Image (cartoon, rainbow, N blue to C red):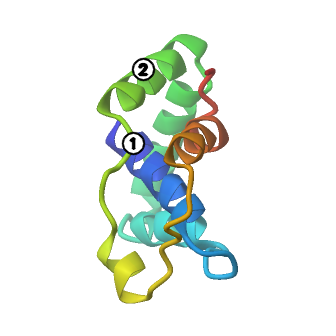
Amino acid sequence: MLFSLAGTYSYFDFYRMSQGVNAHFHNRLLKNAMQLLDQEQKNIFEAHLNRILTNELSLTKICSQVKKIGMPMYIQNYMNANQVFDIDIDSTKNWENALQGYLHCRM
C-alpha cells in the first residue's frame, strides 16, 4: 500500500513539474528506492506487488485507500530547490492522471 501511495505521489509530482525537467523523474525515484534492496528482496517484493496489482479486487482496494488519502498538498524540497514546480497546473486532473496512469485505477 505504501509503495503504491509513494509511486502515485511521485507520478503526481511528475505532472506538477515544468516541461523539460520531468523526463524520467518518476522512474528514477522508484529505481533509487529499489536499489536499497538486494536481489532476493527485489524478487520477493516484485512477486508480491504483481500478485496484488494484477488481482482486480486487491487493486480496487489499493485504489480506494489511495483515493481516500488524497492527492499530495506539498511542494517537495527537490521541486522547490530546482525551481521546477509549475504553478499553472490542474491538480485534480494531475491526480486523476496519477491514479489512472500509475495505479491503473478506474475513475
**Which of the two labelled residues, at mark 2 and mark 1, occupies the earlier sequence position?**
2
Badge 2 amino acid: Ser
Residue in the picture at 51% in, 53% down = 12
Rendered-image quadrant of the C terminus: top right
Read off the residue under disc 2: 64
Rendered-image quadrant of the N terminus: top left
Residue in the picture at 58% in, 37% down = 96
Alpha carbon distance from label 2 to label 1: 13 Å
In the rendering, at what x and y percent does residue 14 appear? 56, 63
Q: Quadrant of residue 69?
A: top left
Q: Is residue 92 above or below residue 13?
A: above
Residue lying at the far bottom in this picture: please name it.
Answer: 82
Crowding around mark 2 (Cα neighbors within 10 Å: few <14, some 14 to 19, many 20+) is some
In the rendering, at what x and y percent does residue 39 appear? 47, 62
Q: Is residue 69 above or below residue 26?
A: above
Residue lying at the far front in this picture: please name it.
Answer: 88
Residues 101 and 42: in front is 101
Residue in the picture at 45% in, 72% down = 32
Q: Quadrant of residue 76?
A: bottom left
Q: Is 41 displayed left or right of 73 in the figure?
A: right
Read off the residue under disc 1: 71
Residue lying at the far top in this picture: please name it.
Answer: 57
Badge 1 amino acid: Met
In the rendering, at what x and y percent does residue 90 appear? 56, 50
Q: Is residue 90 above or below residue 37?
A: above
Crowding around mark 1 (Cα neighbors within 10 Å: few <14, some 14 to 19, many 20+) is some
Residues 77 and 29: in front is 77
Residue in the picture at 58% in, 18% down = 55
User: Element type at marker 2?
Assistant: helix
Closer to the observer: label 2 or label 1? Answer: 1
